[in-house]
């Protein structure tokens, strides 16, 4: 009896350890769009690429990290909030993305989140010198956010390493 328990315990422990190393936010297949003009503009960059599959993809995005958190008050009496959160992060040839929308009860990770985020991030044009109000206006429009939010927070790390935090409470 003890011997059969040991035989079953080893594979179970191995499966537990292996699933603990899973990173479901990691993007496995970068989103590639068919944009002839962009391809021409990025030819030199792609030729100089040293194995980073995301280089052509992220070259149109001015952000290394982008984190958007929006809170909506859904029950004023009980002070209950629902959140919308979109995250995009690149680091050492690795891209991670996730979207959690509690209002629509959706949770996207990895490639699914990247497919949803990429077109929005490509539309954003604000930079480190853009005023807070312009950033809030642009992000609200691009992400099609309901403006009845209670709190809007944006954390950005630009490709030059500059970090900015924007927060607005109503």
Image (tube, rainbow, N blue to C red):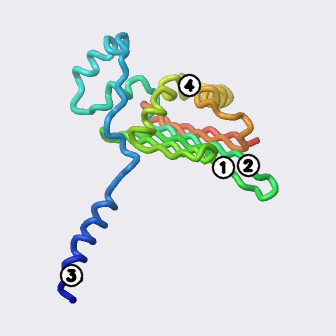
Q: CA distance from mark 4 to mark 3?
A: 59 Å
Q: Which residue is mark 1?
A: 82
Label 4 or label 3, whichever lies nearer to me, is 3
Q: Earlier in the sequence, mark 2 or mark 4?
A: 2
Place of residue 126 in the rendered image (x, y in percent of width and height, measured from the top left): 56, 25
Place of residue 36 in the rendered image (x, y in percent of width and height, measured from the top left): 34, 11
Nearest to the observer: residue 147 or residue 4: 4
Q: Residues within 10 Å of mark 1 (few under 14, many from 20)?
A: some
Label 2 or label 4, whichever lies nearer to me, is 2
Place of residue 131 in the rendered image (x, y in percent of width and height, measured from the top left): 64, 27
Q: In the drawing, does residue 36 fall left or right of residue 64?
A: left
Q: Which residue is mark 4?
A: 126
Give the residue drawn at x 21%, y 30%.
50
Q: Earlier in the sequence, mark 4 or mark 3?
A: 3
Asked if the residue under mark 2 is in contact with the one under mark 1, i.e. CB atoms within 8 Å, the reply is yes
Nearest to the observer: residue 120 or residue 169: 120
Asked if the residue under mark 4 is in contact with the one under mark 1, i.e. CB atoms within 8 Å, the reply is no
Q: Earlier in the sequence, mark 1 or mark 4?
A: 1
- Could you say which quadrant of the image residue 56 lies in? top left
The residue tagged with tag 1: helix, strand or loop? strand
Q: CA distance from mark 1 to mark 3?
A: 46 Å
Q: In the drawing, does residue 156 fall left or right of residue 44?
A: right
Q: CA distance from mark 2 to mark 4?
A: 30 Å
Q: CA distance from mark 1 to mark 2?
A: 7 Å
Number of numbered discs: 4
Circle number at residue 74? 2
Q: Residues within 10 Å of mark 2 (few under 14, many from 20)?
A: some
């Amino acid at each position: 009896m003890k011997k059969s328990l040991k035989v079953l315990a080893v594979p179970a422990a191995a499966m537990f350890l292996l699933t603990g190393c899973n990173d479901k936010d990691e993007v496995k297949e970068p989103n590639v769009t068919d944009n002839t003009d962009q391809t021409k503009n990025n030819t030199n960059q792609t030729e100089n690429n040293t194995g980073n599959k995301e280089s052509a993809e992220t070259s149109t995005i001015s952000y290394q990290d982008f984190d958007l958190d929006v809170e909506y008050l859904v029950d004023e009496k009980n002070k209950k909030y629902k959140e919308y959160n979109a995250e995009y992060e690149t680091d050492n040839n690795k891209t991670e993305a996730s979207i959690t929308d509690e209002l629509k009860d959706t949770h996207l990770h990895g490639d699914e989140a990247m497919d949803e985020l990429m077109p929005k991030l490509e539309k954003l044009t604000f930079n480190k010198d853009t005023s807070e109000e312009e950033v809030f206006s642009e992000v609200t429009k691009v992400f099609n956010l309901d403006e009845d939010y209670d709190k809007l927070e944006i954390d950005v790390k630009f490709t030059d390493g500059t970090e900015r935090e924007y927060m607005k409470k109503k």
